Image (tube, grey):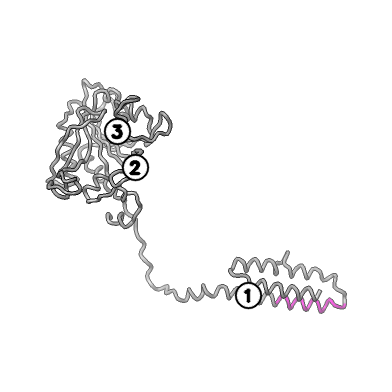
């Protein structure tokens, strides 16, 4: 048994030097000094097999081995903790802490809130609708039945043959009209839209839109023009000039594109406006009679206008940003400029 004790001593001390971290050191303690199944405990339990005349010597040797291993364990524990202690000695706890960087609103969110404020002054309320829409609401009720060529204007993500990720916020027109009919309404419908397009400096597959809708008696194109001019001058400056060009959207008639004199070159021509002096800020028009009918309104009694604009595009014009991909690249160097 004395030979076993000597063998245990050698093995335990060799293993102790291999313990490179506190977790491994704890495993060594359990393996050799553990009270229930430790190697030293198992050795002491075999004392009954030692001849009576040798038991005193064996007990003394086992007790010395226990003290030796316990001392070696404590020395190794101190040795492993020493680098951490030395590091703590180099820390001056009286120094002030490093300032924590505060988050800020994303540029798109800032632009949306500014738009909400402008339209709120005109009496528009905010309503939000689902980003996943039925084909029926996204296209058919907006004057685009199956196989209608106007559907090619929107590259669509289909969830299944009858469900899509909305390609524009215009389905909200039908939802809002059906919610409020027959009362007059004046709402803006912000939210994300999705199109199966290549990501470039000018287009993203996911982007925000703000849809506007006003329905009531005797609403005319002049009301739409006044709303767009007022918006442009509140958002970009009181001296802004606005023009309207004929266009086509299946859910408005007549349809227009709304342009503003370039804020960068003030109409003289630059890279941002493609040297035309004008930049497009939204598409708009008078709500098509069939769309009014689909929303529950009698087009012989009610009329209305609608418009749609992109907050990212508004922000790009206002802050002279030439790449829409910067909005969602999570580059804090870009986002941090708009605190």
Around disc 2, counting alpha carbons within 10 Å, would you say few (fewer than 14), some (14 to 19), or many (20 or more)?
A: few
Q: Which residue is mark 1?
A: 74
Q: How many numbered discs, if any? A: 3
Nearest the eye: 135 or 60 = 135
Residue 249 screen position, x and y as percent: 25, 30
Dot 2 or dot 3: first in sequence order is 3
Dot 2 or dot 1: first in sequence order is 1
- Distance between the alpha carbons at the discs numbered 2 and 3: 14 Å
Quadrant in which the C terminus is drawn? bottom left
Residues drawn in magenta = 53-67
- Residue 289 lies in the magenta stretch: no
Nearest the eye: 71 or 161 = 161
- Distance between the alpha carbons at the discs numbered 2 and 1: 65 Å
Q: Residue at x 42, y 29 (%)?
A: 161
Against 243, is 91 above or below? below
Residue 173 screen position, x and y as percent: 29, 31
Which SS class for mark 1?
Answer: helix
Q: Which residue is mark 3?
A: 153
Q: Is residue 183 left or right of residue 94?
A: left
Against 109, is 210 above or below? above
Around disc 3, counting alpha carbons within 10 Å, would you say few (fewer than 14), some (14 to 19), or many (20 or more)?
A: few
Nearest-to-viewer mark from 1 and 3: 3
Q: Is residue 308 left or right of residue 81?
A: left
């Amino acid at each position: 048994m004395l030979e076993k004790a000597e063998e245990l001593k050698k093995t335990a001390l060799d293993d102790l030097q291999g313990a490179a971290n506190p977790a491994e050191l704890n495993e060594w303690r359990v393996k050799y000094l553990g009270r229930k199944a430790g190697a030293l405990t198992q050795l002491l339990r075999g004392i009954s097999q030692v001849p009576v005349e040798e038991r005193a010597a064996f007990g003394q040797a086992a007790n010395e081995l226990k003290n030796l291993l316990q001392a070696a364990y404590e020395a190794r524990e101190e040795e492993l903790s020493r680098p951490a202690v030395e590091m703590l000695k180099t820390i001056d706890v009286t120094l002030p802490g490093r300032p924590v960087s505060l988050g800020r609103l994303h540029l798109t969110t800032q632009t949306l809130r500014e738009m909400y404020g402008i339209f709120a002054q005109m009496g528009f309320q905010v309503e939000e609708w689902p980003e996943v829409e039925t084909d029926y609401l996204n296209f058919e009720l907006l004057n685009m039945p199956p196989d209608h060529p106007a559907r090619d204007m929107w590259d669509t993500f289909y969830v299944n043959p009858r469900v899509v990720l909305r390609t524009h916020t215009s389905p909200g027109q039908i939802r809002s009209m059906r919610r409020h009919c027959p009362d007059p309404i004046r709402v803006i419908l912000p939210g994300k839209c999705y199109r199966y397009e290549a990501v470039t400096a000018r287009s993203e597959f996911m982007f925000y839109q703000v849809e506007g809708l006003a329905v009531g008696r005797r609403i005319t194109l002049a009301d739409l023009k006044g709303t767009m001019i007022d918006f442009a001058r509140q958002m970009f400056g009181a001296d802004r000039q606005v023009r309207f060009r004929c266009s086509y959207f299946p859910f408005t008639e007549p349809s227009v594109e709304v342009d503003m004199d370039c804020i960068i070159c003030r109409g003289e021509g630059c890279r941002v406006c493609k040297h035309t002096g004008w930049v497009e800020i939204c598409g708009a028009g008078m709500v098509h009679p069939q769309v009014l009918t689909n929303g529950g309104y009698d087009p012989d009694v009610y009329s209305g206008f609608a418009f749609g604009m992109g907050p990212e595009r508004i922000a790009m014009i206002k802050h002279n940003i030439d790449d829409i991909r910067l909005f969602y690249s999570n580059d804090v160097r870009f986002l941090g400029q708009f605190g």
